Amino acid sequence: MIPEEVISDIKHATDIVQVVSETVQLKKTGSNFAGLCPFHSEKTPSFTVSPTKQIYYCFGCGAGGSVFNFVMKRDGLTFPETVRALGRRCGIEVPERALSAEEKEKIGAREKIFLANRLAADFFSQTLKGGQGSGALAYLHNRGITDETIEKFGLGFAPDSWDAVSGCLSSHRVPVDIAVGSGLLIAKETGRYYDRFRNRIVFPIFDTAMQVSGFGGRVMDDALPKYLNSPETPVYHKARSLYGLHAAREGIRQSGTAFVVEGYFDALALHQHGIAQAAATLGTALTRDHVRLLSRCGAERFVLVFDSDGAGIRAALRSVPVFQKEYMTAKVLVLPTGHDPDSFVREAGADAFLELADKAMDLLEFLMDAAIRRHGLSVEGRLKVLGDMREPLLAMEDRVARSLYIRVLADKVGIDEGAVSEKIHKAPAANVRPQVAEPWQDAPVKSLDRIKEENSLEFQIVSMLVRYAGIHAYCRDVGIADYFQEPGLKEICSLALAYDGPPEAMTDWFLTNLREEGQRELVARLAIDEFPVIHQRCVTLIDQYVRNRNRLGDDLSKRIRDAEARGDHELLLSLLEEKRRFSQDLKRRQH
Ligand SMILES: [Zn+2]
């Protein structure tokens, strides 16, 4: 761990404009600098750097934060690595601080889980090669998996036993709480334990540092569940893990392309056939973290590989906003009927697969064609197609791209482009808000039309607290943080009210203390624009919010009396529960 004062020294000795200038050509615009964003591709600069606040924010993709956040994101470093890198730059040496007992324990637990996983992976691998694993080995060979692949991916076998893994771990003196914490053992209510993985082929899941973070297990017959994965643990999160990524990194970097498949065997088969840029999601929809992970490995193009069934359409539909939010595009490769990537590549070979990948369809076009296949091109069918495409098209924030897709869709369904556009845009989507100034501000706010919750008074109060320290005392007096409902905003609010330094160092306070990247980006966005704030309007807004929340309590009491009078017991019970929760809030407020 690095001492706080060293971090602070390095921060003060570093100029964000200089650091950013190493990769981004910046131009002065008013009091800020602007340039082309290094985190998404764009033609007009929306990446803004404030020299006075020492922060950056991109109005295109929403990336933002301090100079530390910038270097972490740009160079893919951890926080301590970033501090050391910037320390070297300004000649400040970074000493190591001794860890506190709590920190040691936390790091210790993670390391112990990695160790338990490693021991179990070796055990599974040995078992596969020994007599007990002969059936499993035959099964793998039968599915076309070579010994080389088995070795490279560390495949193993969990014997048909309730205590084989637990025996192995205890012989290596792994504490029981670690074995349970790793997900390898399951605790029974009686205080005893048993193995999670039994009579299954086992696939170790590696993180990018080549450590075993978790396991997947597959049965060899029709037993259920067919696949079983490690639960979420301190070192394994399925929304942030991809199977085979450790082996795919180099291939992705070289080709700039990532193939995303759905199953273990799909990933293995592609790798075995020389298509080394494939990774599998682990029984979950593709997440933004997955996309970020892959793009950090160098992926610029994404190809989602689906079997030809309806599950592919659902997964594709879900991934549209994921790619949109990361400013990435994706293609969809649908295999011929009856094939999955594994069977296809074994039968037709790698070249045939890559040929199909070259012809892979754009994600949106894939959805259009699927909708047309589903509904047909009758009058009614075409209207349904437009209805199906409305949400994915509106999810596109890039208006130029959206209008291009509308043209494609108009072409496909044979309807005039203007009419299609009107149909898509007709009823305004719930999350699109016209650009208007905050009521407490003098000037309009750029690009604040993003999230639905931003309409709320809580959001407005937070954006006021971040920009204007002059209102903090008033907010503290009315105890405003206790009224907040949205946990993320509540945290920013409490942090603002705990601040007592000079106004110019306030942004830094938020960026240092907020743990969530989304929260830091929000603060950077709010802080980078300076508008004159009108104190009295702030006060009005806060009073209005407090009144609203209190009125909710009065209203509840009235509804309870009504329900009582009418003898509606079911309603009465639920209202009383609501009231109980509300008064708990209130009590907390008074302490
Ligand atoms: Zn950007």
Image (tube, rainbow, N blue to C red):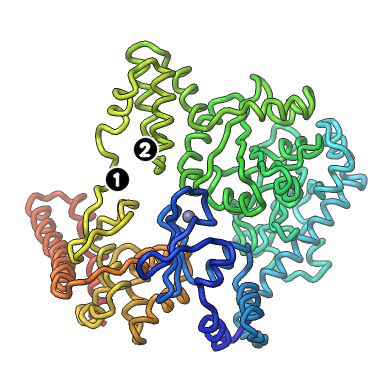
**Amino acid type shown at disc 1:** Val
Q: Are marks 2 and 1 in contact (CB under 8 Å)?
A: yes
Q: Residue at x 76, y 42 (%)?
A: 276
Is residue 72 shown left or right of residue 439? right
Is residue 249 shown left or right of residue 440? right
Residue 99 place in picture, x, y as percent: 64, 84
Q: Residue at x 27, y 65 (%)?
A: 581
**Amino acid type shown at disc 2:** Leu
Q: Quadrant of the N terminus?
A: bottom right
Label 2 crowd (10 A; few <14 / some 14-19 / many >=20): some
Query: Which picture quadrant has residue 303?
Result: top right
The residue that label 1 is drawn on is 432
Q: Residue extending furthest top?
A: 378
Label 1 crowd (10 A; few <14 / some 14-19 / many >=20): few
Query: Which picture quadrant has residue 272?
Result: top right
Residue 312 visible at all: yes
**Mark identifier at residue 58:** none
Query: Which picture quadrant has residue 489?
Result: bottom left
Residue 349 place in picture, x, y as percent: 79, 26
The residue that label 2 is drawn on is 394
| SS of the residue under disc 2 | helix
| SS of the residue under disc 1 | loop
Instruction: Depth check: give the residue in front, 545 or 432.
Output: 432
Instruction: Depth check: give the residue in front, 131 or 284.
Output: 284
Whichever of labels 2 and 1 marks the residue nearer the N terminus, that label is: 2
Is residue 258 shown left or right of residue 292? right
Whole-angstrom CA distance, mark 2 to mark 1, is 9 Å
Instruction: Depth check: give the residue in front, 82 or 284.
Output: 82
- 228 lies above or below 404: below
Residue 84 place in picture, x, y as percent: 65, 78
Q: Residue at x 40, y 37 (%)?
A: 400
